[in-house]
Image (spheres, helix red, strand yellow):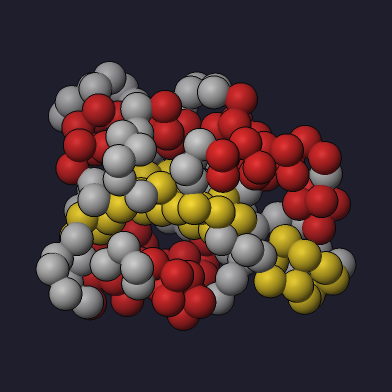
Amino acid sequence: MKKKNILFILSGSIACFKACGLISQLAKEGCSVKAVCTQNALQFIGLATLEGLTGKPVYYDMFAGREAGTEHISLTKWADITLVCPASGNIINKMAAGIGDDCATTLFLSHDFKKPFVIAPAMNQNIYTNPATQAALAKLKSWGVDVLPTAEGRLACGDAGPGRMLEPAAIRAALEKYL
């Protein structure tokens, strides 16, 4: 496998802990992974964990880095693949509406769609089946985003239904065509 550069965006979901396993696996396979977090994701997973798994700084503030204000451009140029995992209902709806109000959503706006952009949704079944979220997912698919399915089962809130993020092994298998 040719070493790939993977831009790994985490949004606010309890499923961030699963995403860490996938980041670790991709790094062990020789991929170069850079993590980007929304502020909500940082409520579920710490910077030290992501820095330890990737061996690189984590991007979460557009104006705090070495390239303050332009990292959304350099990161999209660097990436061979962009993966939003977990992709919350919030980030999915923001991307579909063209809202770029943080590092993660601005990366979507600056993405070069000649390269793969993949999302792994994770949310409560009511958020997942909400007409706004379903319309946003359809819009993203029409733009060329590879939207992975969700699993059904017990959710973090105790409910059961669709919206559960796929297990890391299933997401890794879905990325195979790009790796």
Q: Position of residue 158 (x, y in %)?
A: 84, 69
The answer to whether residue 51 is visible is no
Picture quadrant of residue 48: bottom left
Q: How many marks?
A: 0
* Quadrant (top left, top right, bottom left, bottom right) of the C terminus: bottom left
x, y percent for residue 99: 55, 22
Report the residue at 84% width, 71% height from top.
Answer: 160
Where's residue 33, x and y in %?
Answer: 25, 58
In the rendered view, tell whether residue 30 sits above or below residue 78: below
Picture quarter with the N terminus: bottom left
Question: Which residue is most to the left?
Answer: 2
25 or 1, nearer to the observer: 1
Q: Is residue 112 visible?
A: yes
Image point 62% across, 48% down: which residue?
A: 88
Side (left or right) of 120 relative to 155 = left
State whether residue 167 is above or below residue 130. below
Q: Is residue 46 left or right of residue 138?
A: left
Residue 12, placed above or below residue 2: above
In this rendering, position of residue 8 left or right of residue 131: left
- At horizontal 77% and vertical 65% (from top left) the residue drawn is 162
Residue furthest out toward the front: 142
